[in-house]
Image (tube, grey):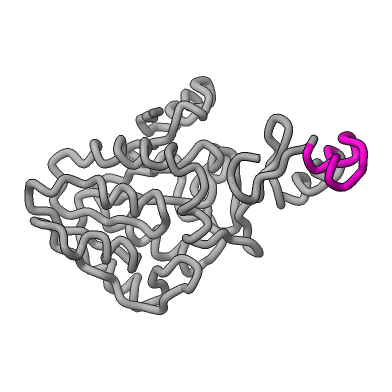
């Protein structure tokens, strides 16, 4: 039911021939270990140090929601002329939604983002070098961060595996975490864009506090009350 990787309690109980309460108990145990997050009537996997979804998987989950978020995030460009676009599927959609009617320089560690924009009119693409991670097709390590350190950017569009008020923005891999934090250091403004399931999720490496963000762009599937709690920490919260 729902996104790939998501399970439905009733369907699982029927499939395994056990009581729904048994499934719920097992899901609770998995949740206590941080491996899944429970939803009404189901659960979905959490990205952690030991588990990270691939870009191919992300391109199939919550896609309409991601497109809405990406379009709204692109509208926050303002008069920025130099922009960092993070790795990941939602940032890739943001890159594709950026205006083509004025000069723009896009710096990215993501091969798919660079590929999507390479032929775009008025867009100059700067691809950061480094070791390419297979699952995400993005570069990491000291080459990447050193190159980033030489820039002053107007805006960074950042993704994360989790965002929580207590632990900030997190991602499973320390090498990825380094690139993200360096991009934020290089940028005057940072916008986080992510689907509602990222909220409250915590991964292994923290790279920023919520207060460091100018804006958070997500969907109306994040409850208004929860959005307000994030807004109290500083960023403007946009729900689409």
Left/right placement of residue 170 relative to residue 193 reads right
Q: Is residue 108 left or right of residue 23?
A: left
Does residue 164 appear in the picture of this structure?
Answer: no
User: Quick check: 188 above or below 114?
Assistant: above
Q: Is residue 34 visible?
A: yes
- Horizontally, is 119 left or right of 44 in the view? left
**Residue 215 versus residue 129 in the image, above or below:** above
Q: Where does residue 59 sit, x and y in percent of width and height? A: 46, 53
**Residue drawn at point x = 27 percent, y = 52 percent:** 95
Q: Position of residue 134 (x, y in %)?
A: 48, 73
Instruction: Pinpoint residue 2: horizontal percent, then vertical percent.
Output: 61, 40
Magenta span dominant secondary structure: helix
Q: Residue at x 41, y 79 (%)?
A: 131
Task: Tell whether position 17 is magenta.
Answer: yes
Place of residue 101 in the rendered image (x, y in percent of width and height, measured from the top left): 8, 46
- Quadrant location of the C terminus in the rendered image: top left
Pick the front one: 171 or 17: 17
Determine if the magenta segment contains residue 141: no
Number of marks: 0
Q: Residue at x 52, y 62 (%)?
A: 54
User: Hey, which residue is sitting farthest top in the picture?
Assistant: 225
Residues in magenta?
11-24
Query: In this picture, is 135 found above or below 199?
Result: below
Instruction: Indicate the quadrant containing the N terminus: top left, top right, bottom left or bottom right.
Output: top right
Q: Where is residue 11, by image quadrant?
A: top right
Front residue of 61 and 231: 61
Q: Nearer the viewer, residue 216 or 182?
A: 216
Residue 16 lies left or right of residue 63; in this view the side is right
| Rendered residue at 46%/73% (across/down) | 133
Q: Quadrant of residue 173?
A: bottom right
């Amino acid at each position: 039911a729902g996104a790939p990787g998501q399970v439905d309690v009733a369907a699982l109980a029927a499939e395994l021939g056990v009581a729904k309460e048994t499934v719920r108990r097992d899901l609770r145990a998995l949740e206590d270990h941080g491996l899944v997050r429970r939803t009404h009537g189901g659960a979905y996997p959490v990205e952690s140090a030991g588990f990270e979804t691939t870009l191919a998987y992300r391109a199939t989950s919550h896609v309409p929601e991601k497109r809405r978020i990406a379009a709204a995030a692109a509208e926050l460009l303002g008069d920025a002329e130099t922009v960092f676009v993070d790795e990941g599927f939602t940032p890739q959609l943001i890159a594709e939604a950026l205006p083509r009617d004025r000069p723009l320089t896009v710096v990215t560690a993501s091969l798919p983002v660079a590929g999507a924009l390479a032929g775009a009119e008025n867009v100059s693409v700067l691809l950061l070098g480094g070791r390419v991670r297979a699952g995400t097709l993005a570069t990491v390590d000291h080459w990447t961060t050193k190159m980033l350190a030489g820039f002053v950017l107007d805006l960074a569009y950042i993704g994360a595996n989790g965002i929580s008020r207590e632990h900030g923005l997190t991602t499973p891999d320390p090498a990825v975490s380094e690139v993200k934090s360096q991009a934020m250091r290089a940028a005057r403004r940072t916008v986080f864009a992510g689907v509602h399931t990222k909220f409250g999720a915590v991964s292994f490496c923290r790279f920023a506090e919520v207060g460091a963000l100018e804006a958070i762009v997500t969907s109306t599937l994040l409850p208004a009350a929860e959005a307000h709690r994030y807004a109290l920490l500083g960023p403007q919260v946009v729900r689409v």
